[in-house]
Image: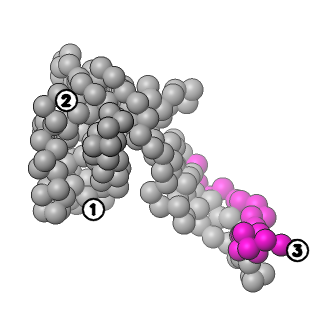
Amino acid sequence: MATDEERSRWVVHGERLIYDNRGIRLGLVDVEIPDGERFEHHAVHLDRAAIAVVVDERDRVLLMWRHRFLADRWGWELPGGLIDAGEEAIDTAAREVEEETGYRVKEIEHLLTYQPMAGMVDSEHNLFLARGAELVGSPTGEIEADLVEWIPMAQIPDIIAHGDIWTSGTLIGLYAARDRLNSGRA
C-alpha cells in the first residue's frame, strides 16, 4: 500500500531543454500529478548562489544600496553571487564580499541553505555569517552598488518595514543571522 507521501508525489517522466546559457536553463518538464493528469510544466534552473551576512564588533551589518532593473527598485542588499564551477559556496561568499564591497571577511560559517521559489525555480541559495571584516581596497570589477554602508542591526526592522530591504536572500539572511547571534551560538 502506498504511503501518503507516495500518493502525493509528482512523477517526472522527462525534461526537454528550451534554453541554456551561463547561469540559467529553461526546460519543459513532463510531469504526472497524483490524480494521474499528465502535462508539461515550465522549470527554471539557476546556478547556485552564495550570500554573506557580514557583522562587525559594533553589531552592524555590511549592506549595499543597489538598483534592480527588473523590478525598477532600489534597496539594501547583502553581498553575494553565483558559485563558480568547482568552487565551494563558502569561498564564493567570501570572494563576493571582497569583490563587491572591498572588505575581506575574518571568520565565516554556514547559516542555512534554501530555495526561494521551489514551485517552478531550482535556485539553491547558501547563506553565510561572517564575523568581522577589514577594508582591503575598493570594490573590483563591475560596480554593483551605489553605496556600501555598515548599518546598525537595531535599525534593520525599520528599514524592512520602510520597504528598503525587500530581496529574499537579504531578508532571510538578516533574520537567520539575528537568530544565530541572539541564540548564544554566536
Magenta part of the chain: 1-20
Q: Amino acid at mark 1?
A: Ala
Question: Residue pushed farthest top?
Answer: 136
Mark 3 element type? loop
Q: Which mark is residue 71?
A: 1
Q: Nearer the viewer, residue 111 or 19?
A: 111
Question: Residue pushed farthest right?
Answer: 1
Measuring from the top left, give residue 28's x and y in whole percent.
65, 64
Please indicate, yes or no, whether residue 91 appears anywhere in the rendered image: yes
- Does the segment drawn in magenta span residue 182? no
Q: Residues within 10 Å of mark 2 (few under 14, many from 20)?
A: some
Measuring from the top left, give residue 121's x and y in whole percent.
52, 59
Measuring from the top left, give residue 24's x and y in whole percent.
52, 49
Q: Amino acid at mark 3?
A: Met
Q: Please determine whether, in this image, residue 34 is positioned above or below residue 150.
A: below
Callouts 3 and 1 close, C-beta under 8 Å:
no
Mark 2 element type? loop
Residue wearing tag 2: 56
Question: Residue pushed farthest front?
Answer: 184
Mark 1 element type? loop
Q: Nearer the viewer, residue 136 or 5?
A: 5
Q: Amino acid at mark 2?
A: Asp
Image quarter in which the N terminus is found:
bottom right
Q: Nearer the viewer, residue 165 or 158?
A: 158
- Does the segment drawn in magenta span residue 19? yes
| Residue 131 figure quarter | top left
Q: Which mark is residue 36?
A: none
Q: Earlier in the sequence, mark 3 or mark 1?
A: 3
Q: Nearer the viewer, mark 2 or mark 1?
A: 2
Residue wearing tag 3: 1
Measuring from the top left, give residue 85's x and y in whole percent.
55, 30
